[in-house]
Amino acid sequence: MEASASIPKQRDVLNIETLKKVMEGDVYVTPNLTCLLMRFTRIGGGDLGMQMGLLSVWLYGFVLIGLSLYATRRLPSFKQTRPQSLSHPTITIFSAPTAPGSKQILAIRSWLALSPQITVVLFTQHPSFASAFGSRVMVDSSIDFTFLGTPFFHSMLEKSRLFTADITVFVDPQTVLLSDLISTLNYAYNLDRDWLLLASLRNVSYFPFRLDDSGEHWLREDGRRARHQELQEILDHYREWNHCEDRMLMAWNNRNLPLHNGVLPPFLYGKGIHNHWVINEAVSSEFRLIYDASWTISCFSLNYPEHWSEQSIRGSSALEVENRSWENGGNSHLGALYGSMFFHEINYSGLAKLLNCEGHYLFADITEDIVCTSVCQTGSLWARRVLRSRTKKKHMAPAENVKSQNRILNCSLRDQLKSSGSLDLPFSLESLLSVTADNNKTIVLSVAGYSYKDMLMSWVCRLRHLQVTNFIICALDRETYQFSVLQGLPVFHDPSAPRNISFNDCHFGTSCFQRVTKVKSRMVWKILKLGYNVLLSDVDVYWFGNPLPLLYSFGPGVLVAQSDEYNDTGPVNLPRRLNSGFYFARSDGSTIAAMEKVVKHAATSNLSEQPSFYDNLCGEGGSYRISDNRCVEPETNLTTLFLDRNLFPNGAYLDLWKKKNVKEACLKMGCLILHNNWISGRMKKLERQVVSGLWEYDISRRMCLQR
């Protein structure tokens, strides 16, 4: 194929040699050239035109057949259809705003102003959004959030699949959208295949327009309605696009194909990388047509400062969480670890560009020359190379502007992935407690090693479902600590924890179990001395409800604990039947003094901490027992109360774990918790809990199950 061949001028004659070159493939033919050939055969000139009159009639049909076959063979695989009547799709816009500010309110109002067919779903824990907008805005807090309220992108994406809109749009919460989004999506909806589009944001420091009270029209500063051209002129003045910024708009049609192959890692929304990662994997997977609609969708953010409190959830101030670089570092770490982005980045300049040519949409490959001329209106919507003529040079400007801008847009995130930074939370234990504790200064504490990370997450997911947010994790090893940071958990690492914890052999009775359990009592004692009440719960304890209101009712000077007695009748506080995997201790003098005795006794014992609890709080052989469910330690005057087993059953009580429907049997009894103990081996314990249906975590997707 000769790229230098040129189309004859309109006054030239379409001669036999040109036709032969067309048919032999020496001249590349676009669908537009068909229209031009038809024009040129009609124009003709002189004697040669008269001599070829009859021949042209004979050749005309032959040429059209040949050109149709040739053009069909040369067209890209993502050809498009133009239906007789365009349908208008339903559109759902998803975003995750933080505390409501003027930028976010303006952005959301601009989305609602686009079309009555648009609905908005806001993933947020901030309560004020629920009443700020009308019925077309839904607030959803049921996805996964970090302990500081940052939503997880993979959980947002999974939840969005439950909505039945024709088109899904994900956009930054401060992005203002204009009406060309609707026309672009209406056009894209009528393509004959699955697609994913992206549009880069423009940063605008001056935007002298506002929405009217009805939220339907943009107004100028003088109160008059602004024309779309006026809005566009402002945006054209601020073409500060940057593909390296992750705050882009993404949209796709909801048919049959996924966006990409593989599993989306647990990225934090708005903390970089995740949009680039999805686009990179979508291009690599080749499931969909991926194209850049930055030139047809006006989306921008206002970069002037606004004054609103960054008060985070549960009372943590901006000062306490101002250094949140670990969130971006975590996303960079995941981006380098999963998928192909670290090894093969996409080149944004190589993506097809969607242009609007005099009201008609045109796909452009700007790595080749393309001209947006009046022949765009003939209906052809793709051209790899349009041959230039002197009369069409003035129409080169749109494509040249795109090419020039695209050189600015392209970027590489390779260095950012390589230097992902540290995955350490900038919190001391004291500051972490102040962020997570409830109004009663109570903490739910769990201690876990890497072998129990999945059971830890199932436990966390259950607490999230019950809206219990005042929990904290003590990691026994560095692996558990980093895993917990990436899962958005409030975690700290105990440097004095035992090392070389066995992955599969750390169950009850083993030396590993004995070393690990002593960490728990030591950490409880330390937190009690810092002024916080502690509910210690092992990760193999399933919560049917929140037990804290009942546990508060027993008052100060009382430590309440689960009984490990398995007999149906008789005392529940028999010797060494106190279960140290679930108990509630208040931060008062008698409890702190008694816990100190337990910790010191366990430090010199060859057994686990559990016998140390009973021997110190109930006396050796039960000498401090005062009833069938109570003990009183004489030196500290601390009362130990053994909880009702119908409400707090252990793993051997009434053979509950052997019931056909464990959950139904427990709920019928009124259980608040059920301990998955009295079973030997981590894998057996894990299997029993999963099979019973008391499992809340999707291991493969790294997110809580969405029921």
Image (cartoon, rainbow, N blue to C red):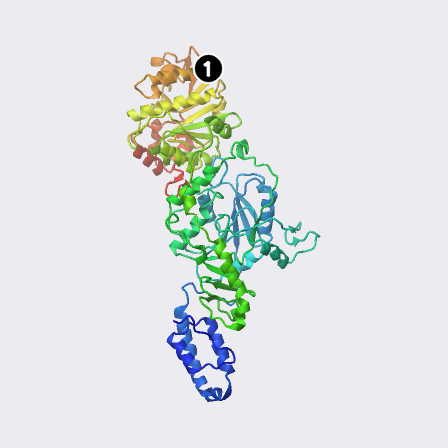
Residue 91 image point, x, y percent: 52, 54
Give the amino acid type for the residue marked by disc 1 in the picture: Ser
Residue 98: give x, y in percent of width and height.
Answer: 54, 40
Residue at 53% x, 34% y is 313
Image: 351 above or below 24: above
Of residue 464 and residue 147, the one placed in the foreground of this image is: 147
Q: Residue lying farthest right?
A: 222
| Towards the viewer: 166 or 296 | 296
**Looking at the image, residue 303 lies above or below residue 425:** below
Residue 630 placement: quadrant: top left
Quarter of the figure that contains the N terminus = bottom left
Q: In this view, does 44 lie above or below 526?
A: below
Extreme-top residue of the structure: 635
Residue 367 visible here: yes
Between 695 and 276, the one lying in front of the other is: 276
x and y percentages locating residue 101 in the rendered image: 60, 42
| Residue matched to label 1 | 590
40 sits left or right of 702 in the view: right
- Percent of width and height locating residue 89: 52, 58
Q: In this view, does 152 lie to the left or right of 661?
A: right
Label 1: element kind:
helix
